[in-house]
Amino acid sequence: MVFTGEQQSSMARYLQMKRQMRRPRAAGLVAYSGTRGSYAEEACIRFFGENRLFIPHKSFEDVFKTITGGGADYGVVPIENSTTGAINENYDLLIRYQAAIVGEVLIPVHHCLLGVPGAAISEIQSVYSHEQGFYQSRDFLSKYPNWTLVPYHNTAVAAKMVHDAADPTKAAIASQRAAEIHHLDVLAESINGADNNTTRFIVVSRLLENRPGRNKISLRFTLSDTPGALYQLLGIFDAEHLNLSKIESRPIPNNQWHYQFFLDFIGEIDEDHLDAILKRVMAHTRSFEFLGFYPHG
C-alpha cells in the first residue's frame, strides 16, 4: 500500500516521540491550573504525593506553555467529567502544544456552597465558581433563581475571592478542602447532582515516558470522507482484542463540517505490538497524532 505524505508524517512524529522517550522524573516541578484547595491540586497530590513543588497557574494554556517551555516537568489538567463530559479546551491544547499524556488520575467531585464565617444562605445574592461547577450543581441552584451566577476560571480561586471580599452576600461553589484552606463556612454540602461525579485529570509532559504499568493509549485522528471509514478503523481494535474506552469527536478548526476524533483504548501490549497497531491505524486514517501511552488510572 502506498501511504500519503500526511500519513507518513503522522508515523514519523510518533517514531520521533518514541526516540525521545524518557524515564519518569523522581523530582521536579508540577504545574496546574488553579490555586490551593482546587481539585487540580488534589489530583497533583494524589498522583505525585505531597513531596513535590506544585505551581499554580491562571489558565489551562499557561500550564501547557510552562511544560513545553521547560518551566516544569509535568502539568496536570482536567480532560473530562463523568457528568458534563469532555473539557474541549484541553483537547485542543494537547494538539496545539504537542504535549504527551504520561498519566491520569480520577478525582471524586463533591461541591459545597461556601460563604464567609457567619454567613447564611438567606443572605446570598451572588455565587462564584467555574462554569462546570454551576452546571454540575444546577439542580441545587434552581432552588435559588434570584442568585446571580458569576463564572470564575477555577472553583478554588472563586473560594479565595469570597474570602478576600469578606462579604456575606457572596458565596462560592468549591470543595470542602477549599473551605478549610480559605477559612470559609460550608453553607450546603454535596450540592452537585450526581453522587458519583468524578473528574479525570491527565498528567502531561513535553516528552513521552516509559512509565511502569503502561496499558492505555490515547490517539487523535482524522478520516477520509468515505463510507465505512470509522467502522473499518474501529475494527482494528476489535481484531486486536483491545478495550475501546472512549471516543470523542471535535470540529476541525477552519474546516467546516469536518471532524477529528480522540480515542482511548486499553490493553496489555508491548511497544512492538503498538507499532504494528499504529501502522494499521495509519493505513485507515488521513492523519493521526499519538497522544500518550500510560497507566490506566
Image (spheres, grey):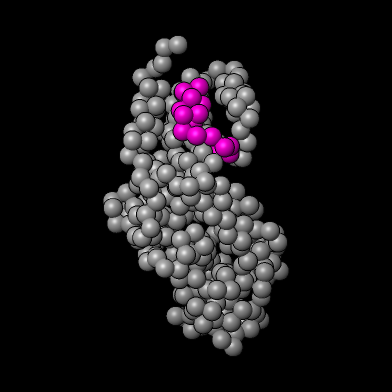
Q: Which residues are magenta?
A: 263-280
| Viewer-side residue, 236 vs 142 | 236
Report the quarter where the N terminus lies: top left
Residue 236's image quarter?
top right
**Is 95 included in the stretch rendered in magenta?**
no
Q: Horizontal and vertical percent for residue 80? A: 56, 50
Residue 269's image quarter?
top right
Measured along the vertical axis of the image, is residue 154 above or below residue 101? below
> What residue occupies the far bottom of the structure in this picture?
118
Measured along the vertical axis of the image, is residue 161 above or below residue 289? below
Q: Horizontal and vertical percent for residue 110? A: 63, 66
Q: Horizontal and vertical percent for residue 108? A: 61, 61
Measured along the vertical axis of the image, is residue 154 above or below residue 181? above
| Viewer-side residue, 21 vs 42 | 21
Question: What is the count of numbered marks?
Answer: 0
**Is 271 included in the stretch rendered in magenta?**
yes
Q: Is residue 262 visible?
A: no
| Viewer-side residue, 180 vs 49 | 49
Q: Is residue 71 left or right of residue 221?
A: left
Q: Horizontal and vertical percent for residue 182? A: 49, 79
Q: Which residue is at 39% across, 17% downward?
A: 4
Q: Is residue 227 visible?
A: yes
Measured along the vertical axis of the image, is residue 40 above or below residue 249? below
Q: Which residue is at 56% across, 47% downward?
A: 296
Q: Which residue is at 39% across, 26% downward?
A: 11
